[in-house]
Amino acid sequence: MTRGNQRDKAREKAQKKQAEQQKKKDAGQKGANKGTSLEERRERDAQVMREKQAKKAAAAEAAGGAVGGASK
C-alpha cells in the first residue's frame, strides 16, 4: 500500500516541467513587462536607452571630450 518515493519523484518531475514552462514564456509575460503591450515596452526601453546615452554623454563631457565613441 505504500508508494515509496514515487510521490517525491512525481513532485520533482512536475516542478521541473513547471520551471521549463516558465522559461518558455514570452517577454510580455515576465516581470515588469506583464500587462504591457509591445509598443509600450518598446517606448519604455527606448526612453531608458536615451537616458543612458545622455548620462554617458554628460560623463564624457565632464571627462573632457568625446571619449569612447563617435558622436553624431
Image (cartoon, rainbow, N blue to C red):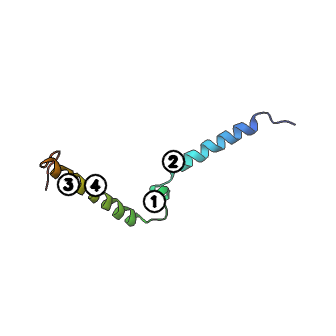
Foreground label between 3 and 4:
3
Could you classify mark 4 by the number of other residues whose Cα lies within 10 Å: few (under 14), some (14-19), or many (20 or more)?
few
- Residue drawn 70% across the image and 37% down it: 9
- Say which label, 4 or 2, has the lower sequence index: 2
- The residue nearer to you, when weighing 42 against 31, is 31
Task: Name the spot of residue 43 as percent of width and height, x first.
Answer: 34, 64
Residue drawn at x 84%, y 36% as measured from the top left? 2
Depicted 68 relative to depicted 42: above or below: above
Give amino acid for label 2.
Answer: Lys
- Kindly report which numbered mark, 4 or 1, lies closer to the viewer in this rendering: 4
Q: Earlier in the sequence, mark 3 or mark 2?
A: 2
- Mark 4 and mark 1 lie on one chain; the one further toward the N terminus is 1
Give the residue displayed 14% in from the left and 53% down from the top: 71
Quarter of the N terminus within the rendering: top right
Mark 1 surroundings: few (<14), some (14-19) or many (≥20) residues within 10 A? some
Q: Secondary structure at mark 3?
A: helix
Q: Mark 4 falls on what kind of element?
A: helix
Q: Earlier in the sequence, mark 2 or mark 1?
A: 2
Viewer-side label of 2, 1? 1
Which of discs 3 and 1 lies nearer the camera? The answer is: 3
Q: Is residue 5 left or right of residue 37?
A: right
Q: Amino acid at mark 4?
A: Lys
Please, what is the three-letter code of the amino acid marked with disc 3?
Ala
Say which label, 3 or 1, has the lower sequence index: 1
Pointer 1: what residue?
Answer: 33
Distance between the alpha carbons at the discs numbered 3 and 2: 38 Å
User: Disc 4 to disc 2, how far (Cα)?
Assistant: 28 Å
Residue located beneath label 2 in the image: 23
Q: Quadrant of residue 72?
A: bottom left
Taking 10 as reference, is 20 left or right? Answer: left
Which residue corresponds to mark 4? 52
